[in-house]
Image (spheres, rainbow, N blue to C red):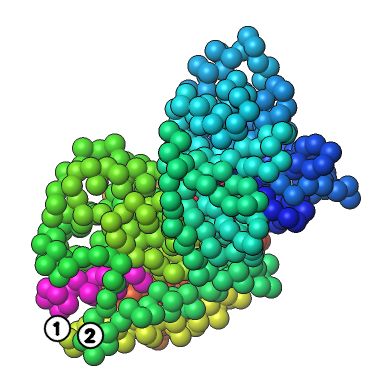
């Protein structure tokens, strides 16, 4: 939600900031703006819409200066207008800032300031500039720290002042900020992706911290202005991974990345001789694992669907009760947790506000909390007492694809490791490992059908409603297929467990309501087949995902995609890929903005 980038150094800031904004655009794309401090003062440009609009507005003229801040907005308070675009200024136009988060008491503060200050936007962010202005005493860091004592809410904040051409001040409460260090130059951003071109040495600000960036170095303080030391972390993401590499969209590239990044999730974590896996970061002894008597998966959106799959996996392999909860519900429920409950929080960004709140709630109640996270050093990764990275690399399309796959891969590895400590024998463990090793080649077979799936999407692009059906471990896959379709093509769709159809949903069936059914050969094949017969009997139009060699499946539909067979619990690793491709090709056929669907942002850091 909103992307921030700041730079102080020796190079011209404008091209670096604009390049950074492009990398952050997936976080919000309602408007964008930039402020650069040079010898002739501060230049500001803002534009509604995409970064390209801002670039067009800047046109050929140079915004000169070696320090600046920039922002891409996902609107929360105040409409999508140029006035509401960041950077925001105080009345004197000396203080300029960009903000990500929500200032909850902005109405009260605005009322308090309304007699002496003039507000030009409807945003909650603008009050911060006026607040800092009112506390300004010549020491910018001190003024920001003082002002923030009056703020309730969340912020990732970068501030500059006309009279301080050598200082950027950053502060964090609830909205992520990462500082990148190169030679004589410093960057600050909402996440590491725009920094990768310049440096991989970073430090993540924690809540309640304030950083002073100068050309000589950085100093970090608490909001009470006590100086603190923070470790530098090295991010091993490859800048190449954050480029489109010839694909028309990040989403398509990320779908096609899956066979490769899946191997990264497995790498170094399998002990074949012993038929097990080892996820060291989970930081759990065999004794602790054996003492777990319940697992709760908590996440949002696509990550939540992987939690649902986790439930099937752990119940089958570990024979332990499992629950799944969406984080926005979990955090406010009277959930019963104790020291024998293991809570897996799953998040690509590691910054999702509800998921983070769930981490804190579960810790408060004494549960064992472990993260399954993609972004290294993200808040959830740091706030959990252990966890495992999914190693999917930077995921830039708003629609999550490769992170989903690697979350499932890691859940399978964890279940294998835990189960081998409880009941699974070595031969069963080795069978599962071999099945896991076969997945990348089988994924490639799925991806080779992209053109065929494109044809199916073209054929169905006039339909306004879709139903996705699955059973067992393919029920969450159906939900994921449905979410992908709505998210990027804006077509209404629902995901359902096929066995539930006759309890109400069958009433919707007619030829204008196509059904995408996952009928692969597993323990529920016969049941699923009967459900699809019922759909067919009621005139439902079917697109079928079936297992290679299942020639009977052709009786159900001419629109078939075939998946190679695999172990039942591994099916989501293959079966989701054609659903991702279907949503992708449908969105392209409908002329949608695939990587940046309307009203959404990649990283949901506000509640
Ligand atoms: O970063 P997270 O995994 O915590 O994000 C959770 C959801 O916001 C995310 O999965 C969302 O549903 C995706 N855009 C779906 O494609």
Q: Is residue 422 left or right of residue 70?
A: left
Would you call the spot at circle 2 few (<14 residues within 10 Å), some (14-19), or many (20 or more)? many
Residue 585 is tagged as none
Quadrant of res 536: bottom left
For the C terminus, the quadrant is top left
Q: Mark 1 near mark 2, Cβ–Cβ under 8 Å? A: yes
**Is 555 part of what is drawn in magenta?**
no
Would you call the spot at circle 1 few (<14 residues within 10 Å), some (14-19), or many (20 or more)? some
Q: Answer whether residue 446 is visible to the viewer in this image.
A: no
Which residue is found at the position 49% from the left and 55% from the top? 203
Percent x, y of residue 462: 62, 56
The span picked out in magenta is 409-425
Q: Which residue in the protein does label 1 denote?
A: 425
Does 168 sit above or below residue 518?
above
**Is 412 part of what is drawn in magenta?**
yes
Percent x, y of residue 497: 32, 58
Q: Which residue in the protein does label 2 denote?
A: 275
Q: Nearer the viewer, residue 292 or 378?
A: 378
Does 471 sit above or below residue 443?
above
Looking at the image, tell me whether mark 1 or mark 2 is earlier in sequence order: 2
Chief secondary structure of the magenta portion: helix
Quadrant of res 576: bottom left
Percent x, y of residue 93: 73, 27
Q: Answer whether residue 274 is visible to the viewer in this image.
A: yes
């Amino acid at each position: 939600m909103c992307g921030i980038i700041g730079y102080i150094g020796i190079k011209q800031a404008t091209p670096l900031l604009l390049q950074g904004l492009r990398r952050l655009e997936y976080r919000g794309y309602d408007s964008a703006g930039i402020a650069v401090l040079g010898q002739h003062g501060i230049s500001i440009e803002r534009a509604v819409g995409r970064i390209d609009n801002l670039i067009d507005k800047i046109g050929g003229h140079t915004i000169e200066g070696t320090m600046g801040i920039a922002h891409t907005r996902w609107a929360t308070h105040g409409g999508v207008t140029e006035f509401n675009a960041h950077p925001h200024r105080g009345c004197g136009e000396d203080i300029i800032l960009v903000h990500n988060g929500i200032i909850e008491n902005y109405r009260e503060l605005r009322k308090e300031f309304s007699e002496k200050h003039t507000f030009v936007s409807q945003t909650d962010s603008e009050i911060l500039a006026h607040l800092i202005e009112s506390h300004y005493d010549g020491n910018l860091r001190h003024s920001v720290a003082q002002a923030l004592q009056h703020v309730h809410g969340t912020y990732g904040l970068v501030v500059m002042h006309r009279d301080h051409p050598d200082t950027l001040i950053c502060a964090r409460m609830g909205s992520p900020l990462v500082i990148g260090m190169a030679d004589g130059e410093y960057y600050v951003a909402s996440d590491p992706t725009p920094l990768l071109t310049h440096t991989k040495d970073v430090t993540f600000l924690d809540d309640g911290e304030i950083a002073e960036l100068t050309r000589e170095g950085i100093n970090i303080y608490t909001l009470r202005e006590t100086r603190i030391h923070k470790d530098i972390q090295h991010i091993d993401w490859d800048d190449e991974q954050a480029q489109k590499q010839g694909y028309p969209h990040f989403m398509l590239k990320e779908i096609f990345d899956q066979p490769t990044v899946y191997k990264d999730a497995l790498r170094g974590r399998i002990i074949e001789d012993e038929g097990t896996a080892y996820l060291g970061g989970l930081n759990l002894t065999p004794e602790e694992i054996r003492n777990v008597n319940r697992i709760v998966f908590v996440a949002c959106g696509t990550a939540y669907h992987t939690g649902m799959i986790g439930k099937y996996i752990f119940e089958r392999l570990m024979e332990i009760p499992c629950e799944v909860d969406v984080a926005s519900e979990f955090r406010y429920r009277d959930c019963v947790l104790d020291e024998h409950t293991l809570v897996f929080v799953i998040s690509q960004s590691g910054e999702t506000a509800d998921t983070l709140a769930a981490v804190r709630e579960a810790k408060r109640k004494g549960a064992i909390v472990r993260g399954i996270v993609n972004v290294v050093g993200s808040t959830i990764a740091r706030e959990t007492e252990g966890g495992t990275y999914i190693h999917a690399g930077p995921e830039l399309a708003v629609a999550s694809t490769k992170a989903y796959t690697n979350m499932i891969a890691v859940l399978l590895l964890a279940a294998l490791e835990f189960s081998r400590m409880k009941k699974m024998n070595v031969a069963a463990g080795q069978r599962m490992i071999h099945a896991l090793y076969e997945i990348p080649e089988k994924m490639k077979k799925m991806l080779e059908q992209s053109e065929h799936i494109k044809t199916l999407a073209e054929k169905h692009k006039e339909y306004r409603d879709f139903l996705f059906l699955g059973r067992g471990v393919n029920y969450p896959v159906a939900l994921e297929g449905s979410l992908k379709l709505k998210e990027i093509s804006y077509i209404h769709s629902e995901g359902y467990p096929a066995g539930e159809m006759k309890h109400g949903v069958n009433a919707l069936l007619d030829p204008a309501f196509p059904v995408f059914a996952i009928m692969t050969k597993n323990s529920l094949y016969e049941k699923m087949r009967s459900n699809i017969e019922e759909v067919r009997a009621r005139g439902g139009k079917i697109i079928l995902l079936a297992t290679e060699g299942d020639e009977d499946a052709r009786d159900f539909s001419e629109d078939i995609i075939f998946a190679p067979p695999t172990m039942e619990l591994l099916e989501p690793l293959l079966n989701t890929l054609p659903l991702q491709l279907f949503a992708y090709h449908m969105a392209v056929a409908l002329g949608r903005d695939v990587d940046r669907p309307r009203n959404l942002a990649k990283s949901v850091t506000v509640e």
